[in-house]
Image (cartoon, rainbow, N blue to C red):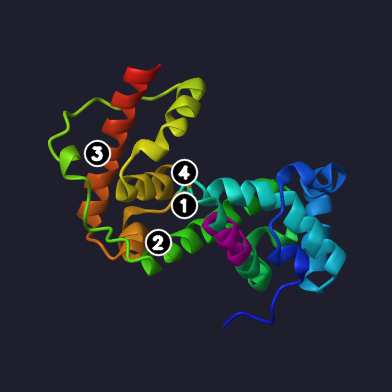
Amino acid sequence: MLSESPPIYQRESVKTSQLNKSDNKLAQSGEALLDILKGCQNNIEHHKETLYKSFYGYVKGVVTRYVTDFHYAEEIVNDSFIKIFNNLSSFQALGQATNVSTSFKAWIAKIASRTAIDFLRKKKIDFNKDDISDINHSSIAYEQSSSSEIKDILKLLNALPQTQRAIFNLYEIEGFSHQEIAVMLSIPENVSRSYLSRAKNKLKALYIENF
């Protein structure tokens, strides 16, 4: 059960271009971020607002890989932050400054992706069904890609069917295991592996066509 309604900065739409850049930088370094997280646990509103503004863009980037509709994405971002604030005590790196920003981003990304998946499930998305046209898609070797190629491939994610896109995001980007994905999407583990393979093949084919 979530706690009381979040303050106004969590409920309103926020454009990343309007966020305070000094606050954004403040929350990125290890020691500063630890102080802000501790302040959030002590329910200090200024620290909570700084955390929200600093990581709003990052969380929205995660959410929009699953849900492209602007208004729904805003709703999911705010729901994600409610969960983030309510569960800060479970963040494992809270007591150490080394790589805390990287660890925190990975932690909130998993919360945001789970929240997006929960939203899709409520929308009655059937993750057992996939685009029939992709079943006989020719297999393409998915070799190690360069960083520039990876960026280009990520731009093509929205061309994937819903299930393939979700599983690719969960496994390749958020780092969930196939076992975890199977539980989240209520599908067999081997189906998760199959959809991931299809997603990789389709992305590789799209990359060849477009770049």
- Measuring from the top left, give residue 112's x and y in whole percent: 54, 58
Range drawn in magenta: 72-80
Instruction: Choose mark 3 or mark 2, whichever is in front.
Output: 2
Q: Nearer the viewer, residue 148 or 152?
A: 152
What is the number of the mark on residue 120?
2
- Measuring from the top left, give residue 24's x and y in whole percent: 79, 46
Above or below, 194 relative to 93: above
Instruction: Choose mark 1 or mark 4, whichever is in front.
Output: 1
What is the number of the mark on residue 107?
none
Q: Main secondary structure of the magenta part?
A: helix
Give the Cα distance between marks 1 and 2.
8 Å
Identify the residue shown where x is 41% and y is 32%.
156
N-terminal-most mark, 1 or 3 = 1
Identify the residue shown where x is 42% and y is 60%.
117
Q: Mark 4 points at which residue?
A: 173
N-terminal-most mark, 3 or 4 = 4
N-terminal-most mark, 2 or 4 = 2
The quadrant of the image that shows the C terminus is top left
N-terminal-most mark, 3 or 2 = 2
Residues packed near mark 3 inside 10 Å, few (<14), some (14 to 19) or many (20 plus): many
N-terminal-most mark, 1 or 4 = 1
Give the Cα distance between marks 1 and 3.
20 Å
Asked if disc 1 and disc 2 are in contact, CB closer than 8 Å, the reply is yes
- Provide the secondary structure element on which disc 3 rests: helix
